[in-house]
Image (cartoon, rainbow, N blue to C red):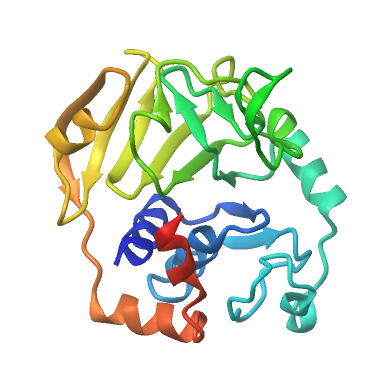
Amino acid sequence: MIIEHVSKAISLLLEDGEKVYIGLNSIPAILGAFLARDVYNKKIRILGVAEADNPKSVSISPSTGNPFYSEEAPVMITADSFDLFQKGLLDVMFLGPVQIDEETNVNLSVIGSYEKPKVRLTGGAATAYLMPLAKKVILWNLKHSKRSLVKKVDFITGTAKYSNNNVFLVTNLGIMKYDRGFKKWIVTHVYPWSNCNVIKDNTDFDIICENVGKVEVTQEDLNFINKVDPYNLRSALEGL
């Protein structure tokens, strides 16, 4: 039930009137966005690398850039979406970094030194360009541990440190929001299997934990997620 709770958590963070951009390989983001729009009736506009402008329906495929998403929707090419970011007209973007640190720096590039990395990652694409421009950045990571939520990332692929936007982090343990006043991450929600102590024990930097809510997945949520993901492709993410 991890992906279902992560997707529900993402849906809670989306608000009426927002334009929401979804990148590649972002199953939790797709599920969360469509859950927010189609189950909770949030008036959001969903865009993404599939270049479909707010498709009426979606079915999860191995690639979230599946062009068939645009069969029943107008086309919004990626270049035009990026222009909206630059003009301050695109509200939400998602990223799935391998490392996130206490200053909102994210790493999608390498583990270890850049010159001789232990692991070379997929790369950041437009992360450095878009992360400071989006009004709301929603990071997601399904391996909440001291190896992923680190004091300082091995390589800064992108950052919101010098921006004034809202930054959230959704993991397999809960939701956190970056507080620019305290310059700390604050836990806002947990799941049935997690709590503040678990999150603190699995985070390599200091966090604030007060007035925490709970994310609950309903049967209606599950029915919708199963409909959107009929082949249960999300289950592959559980072992990442």
Q: Nearer the viewer, residue 33 or 5?
A: 5
Number of numbered markers: 0
Q: Residue at 76% x, 44% y: name it.
A: 84
Q: Residue at 15% x, 57% y: name it.
A: 192
Residue 83 image position (x, y, % from top left): 82, 42
Q: Nearer the viewer, residue 156 or 217?
A: 156
Depicted 48 relative to depicted 94: above or below:
below
Residue 210 image position (x, y, % from top left): 14, 30
Depicted 72 relative to depicted 103: above or below:
below
Image quadrant where residue 65 sits? bottom right
Residue 160 image position (x, y, % from top left): 57, 23
Q: Residue at 62% x, 53% y: name it.
A: 19
Residue 112 image position (x, y, % from top left): 58, 22
Q: Quadrant of the N terminus?
A: bottom left
Image quadrant where residue 155 sits? top right
Image quadrant where residue 25 sits? bottom right
Q: Is residue 109 left or right of residue 18?
A: right
Depicted 170 relative to depicted 196: above or below:
below
Q: Is residue 174 left or right of residue 141?
A: left
Depicted 94 relative to depicted 118: above or below:
below
Q: Is residue 147 left or right of residue 48?
A: left
Q: Residue at 22% x, 23% y: name it.
A: 208
